[in-house]
Image: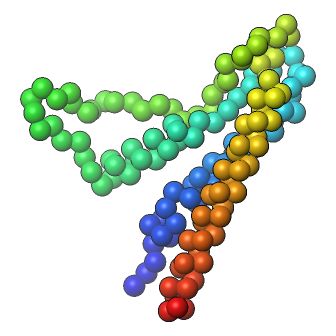
Amino acid sequence: MSISFDNALGIHEKALGFRAQRAEVLASNIANADTPNYQARDLDFAAVLAEQSAKGARQSVGLQRTDSQHIAGEGIQLADPALRFRTPFHPSIDQNTVDIQQEQSNYAENAVQFQASFTLLNSKFKGLVSALRGE
């Protein structure tokens, strides 16, 4: 019997990769806080999660109309989880949209969420190891 790591680890593996990617984007924003015309960017975890859920739903469960008044699900486009520009709270004279306090706050929050995903992933591996050992 083989072990499916996708089933065993769940979303935590992809969440860890996303958090690392977001840390790079936020660090880039902080590094360019004084660059004229620099547009702050961010990654949206909810959009990425929705896309992953939709991919899983399309693979295992299809949309089914149970009533003639239901709207058909064909052609629905989900939000693009790509890198997005952030809307500034306080526009600056040099057109830079980086708010250093917001970026530092987002970076710290992302670091906490990265650590939480890492801890959950670590506990999953510990559970797999103990299951393999028969403990």
At x 76%, y 29%, the residue is 102
Q: Is residue 80 visible?
A: yes
Give left or right: position of 66 versus 82. left
Indicate whether 70 appears above or below 133.
Answer: above
**What residue lies at 50% left-to-right and 92% top-to-bottom?**
134
Question: Could one spot residue 24 in this view of the protein?
Answer: no
- At 83% from the left and 27% from the top, the residue drawn is 100
Q: Residue at x 63, y 36 (%)?
A: 43
Relative placement, left or right, of 103 versus 2 is right
Q: Please say if 72 is above or below 20.
A: above
Report the side of 78 relative to 31 (left or right).
left
Q: Quadrant of residue 22?
A: top right
Looking at the image, the residue that sits furthest to the left is: 68
The x, y position of residue 118, in whole percent, is: 66, 61
Q: Residue placed farthest to the top in the image?
A: 93
Task: Point out residue 13 in the picture as x, y percentages from the top left corner.
Answer: 58, 60
Task: Identify the image quadrant of the N terminus.
Answer: bottom left
| Residue 20: % across, % down | 70, 50
User: Against 57, is 118 above or below?
Assistant: below
> Which image quarter: residue 34?
top right
Residue lying furthest right in this view? Answer: 34
Residue 110 placed where, x, y %?
Answer: 70, 45
Q: Nearer the viewer, residue 104 or 32?
A: 104
